[in-house]
């Protein structure tokens, strides 16, 4: 088995596990980037998504100006291609984390790249919560936070998990591009050590790893979404 | 007369979607006395739901005033001067006005008891006391054994009973029922209406019953207002509205509730009535309460020699009063008939001559 593997994937073996160019390091980098930008971008997206729903025309506190501002911010960030965003916000990144290259620097554009996508998804998910349920909550005198957390988020839980799964998968895709600013990761492995060196086996192996990651996220997401749906 | 518990005065609600002006409610004034079951009937789009949403200010009126229990919730004159309760105060007041809906609007991701508990989240009592309250409410609506189930596991009638328990959680004095039985089958409808009646009788709960089914009004309401195109066409005690309807729409609604229309149509189309001989009169006799104690038909024959052939009869009991309707063919001499009609009028019997003499 190991001989077969070494013969078929020589470049994969050459990269090794640890060290700056190893698989373990690359996998860790991808997971690190995905995790932290999911936290930061996710929170930002959740705040914007909830904001869009509550200030929207059918929301519990309609506010045309605030809705317009949130809506435009989300639209503009969504319109910028991620690779361009990476370069474009470099000065901001430097001001925020002190450097514009490396894995920590990548978290800034990744978070900003994923949040508008997530905000829109959250907006759609929460809009599907029956307005009658919201009205019933208002009728029993529920407060703003009770309606946001106890009704919108709790009732939309299953749908939120579903869109989070989609977002997380697209985020894994974005981390592959973060190699462009020296953040490493599986994507960088596939391009820098695979494609650029004509080491097709490395590219293939990197692809397989990403596929496995996506699959795990998808299966877990689907399972959780089912578990938390009592409709 | 004591002050009404709900007093809506000159309520206007206007929507302006995309520049078009829609008058959802126009110039409506309604007073509801404590302990009443007040029905508001009308077809969809009549403005009933919009109107009742002004009671707990889920819908703010464009102008008019809303006074609940003597307290001004909202008041705005046409020149724009407005007072209204808002924020925390509004939320506290809303807790004293329960509301149930056509589609139940239960929280799907919470169990039956959690749904009721949701209404008590702002209650400062200890968890244990709240739990007891929830158990009591579920007992009241006869759903104690379903406490741990999710709404999706319940039937329509059970869901509505959970909604009622939730609406009653903060011991409201008023319950707004917005088409609460419209999605239910006749038997379940009856159970829910009986439950509302029971709550009304036992706890003096004032019920605002919005419906398009006159049956529901007939079953439990003391008073009723009929709405069309945002306006109240007529209002009064259920008995008065049923026995002396003025507006065409009201008559239409009553006909649907009693099936009388079909009976009259079938009889009017029958050979006997079609080939009505001279000297015979086809008429509808309507009477309420006391009149039913008099042997009317016998009197007609004994005193006036008028023979009444009964083709159809119906007696309803509304608010404890009997309401009767007879379709008869009267045969007699002309003079005798006039005397007989005068006698009937003196007995508070309304006569509609449908065919024959004088018609």
Image (cartoon, rainbow, N blue to C red):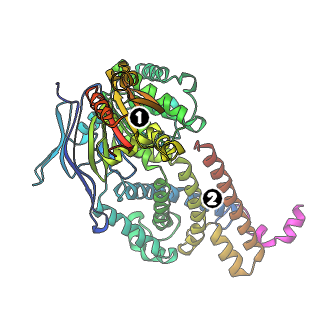
Could you classify mark 1 by the number of other residues whose Cα lies within 10 Å: few (under 14), some (14-19), or many (20 or more)? Answer: many
Quadrant where the image shows the N terminus of chain B: top left
Taking depth in this image into account, of A119 and B12 the one nearest to the observer is B12
Where disc 1 sits, the SS reads: strand
The numbered disc on residue A28 is 2
Which residues are the magenta region? A1-17
- Judged by depth in the image, the label closer to the viewer, 2 or 1, is 1
Query: Where, by quadrant of the figure, is residue B314 drawn?
Result: top left
> Which residue is at a point 31% across and 64% down the rendered structure image?
B17
Q: Position of residue B43 (x, y in %)?
A: 39, 49
Where disc 2 sits, the SS reads: helix
Q: Is residue A132 above or below residue B309?
A: below
The numbered disc on residue B330 is 1
Query: Where, by quadrant of the figure, is residue B34 drawn?
Result: top left
Q: Is residue B259 above or below residue B318?
A: below
Q: Position of residue B56 (x, y in %)?
A: 28, 40
Q: Is residue A15 magenta?
A: yes
């Amino acid at each position: 088995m190991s001989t077969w593997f070494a013969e078929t994937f020589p470049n994969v073996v050459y990269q090794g596990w640890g060290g700056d160019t190893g698989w373990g390091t690359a996998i860790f980098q991808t997971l690190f980037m995905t995790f932290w930008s999911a936290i930061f971008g996710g929170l930002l997206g959740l705040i914007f998504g909830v904001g869009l729903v509550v200030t929207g025309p059918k929301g519990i506190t309609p506010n045309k100006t605030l809705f317009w501002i949130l809506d435009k911010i989300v639209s503009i960030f969504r319109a910028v291609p991620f690779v361009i965003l990476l370069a474009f916000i470099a000065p901001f990144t430097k001001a925020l984390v002190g450097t514009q290259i490396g894995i920590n620097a990548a978290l800034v554009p990744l978070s900003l790249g994923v949040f508008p996508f997530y905000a829109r998804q959250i907006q759609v998910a929460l809009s599907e919560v029956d307005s009658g349920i919201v009205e019933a909550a208002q009728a029993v005198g529920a407060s703003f936070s009770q309606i946001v957390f106890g009704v919108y988020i709790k009732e939309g839980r299953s749908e939120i998990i579903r869109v989070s799964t989609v977002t997380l998968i697209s985020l894994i895709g974005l981390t592959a591009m973060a190699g462009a600013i020296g953040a490493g990761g599986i994507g960088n492995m596939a391009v820098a050590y695979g494609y650029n060196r004509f080491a097709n086996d490395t590219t293939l192996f990197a692809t397989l790893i990403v596929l496995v990651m996506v699959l795990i996220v998808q299966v877990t997401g689907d399972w959780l979404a089912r578990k938390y749906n009592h409709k | 007369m004591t002050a009404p518990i709900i007093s809506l005065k000159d309520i206007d609600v206007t929507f302006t979607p995309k520049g078009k002006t829609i008058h959802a409610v126009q110039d409506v004034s309604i007073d509801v006395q404590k302990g009443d079951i007040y029905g508001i009937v009308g077809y969809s789009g009549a403005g009933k739901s919009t109107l009742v949403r002004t009671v707990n200010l889920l819908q703010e009126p464009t102008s008019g005033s809303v006074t609940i229990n003597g307290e001004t919730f909202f008041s705005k004159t046409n020149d724009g001067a407005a007072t209204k309760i808002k924020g925390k105060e509004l939320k506290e007041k809303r807790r004293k006005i329960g509301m149930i809906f056509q589609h139940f609007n239960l929280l799907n991701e919470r169990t039956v008891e959690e749904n009721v508990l949701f209404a008590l989240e702002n209650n400062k009592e200890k968890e244990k006391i709240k739990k007891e309250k929830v158990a009591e409410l579920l007992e009241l609506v006869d759903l104690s054994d379903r406490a741990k189930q999710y709404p999706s596991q319940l039937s329509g009638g059970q869901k509505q009973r959970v909604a009622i328990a939730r609406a009653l959680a903060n011991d409201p004095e008023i319950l707004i029922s917005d088409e609460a039985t419209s999605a239910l089958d006749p038997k379940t409808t009856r159970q829910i209406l009986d439950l509302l009646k029971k709550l009304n009788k036992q706890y003096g709960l004032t019920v605002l019953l919005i419906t398009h089914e006159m049956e529901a009004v007939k079953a439990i309401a003391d008073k009723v207002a009929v709405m069309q195109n945002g306006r109240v066409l007529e209002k009064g005690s259920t008995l008065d509205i049923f026995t002396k309807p003025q507006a065409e729409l009201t008559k239409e609604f009553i006909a649907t509730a009693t099936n009388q229309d079909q009976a009259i149509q079938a009889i009017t189309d029958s050979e006997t009535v079609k080939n009505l001989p001279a000297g015979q009169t086809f008429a509808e006799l309507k009477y309420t309460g006391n009149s039913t104690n008099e042997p009317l038909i016998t009197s007609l024959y004994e005193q006036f020699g008028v023979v009444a052939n009964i083709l159809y009869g119906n007696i309803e009991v509304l608010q404890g009063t009997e309401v009767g309707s007879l379709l008869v063919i009267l045969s007699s001499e002309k003079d005798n008939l006039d005397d007989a009609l005068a006698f009937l009028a003196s007995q508070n019997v309304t006569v509609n001559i449908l065919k024959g003499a004088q018609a």
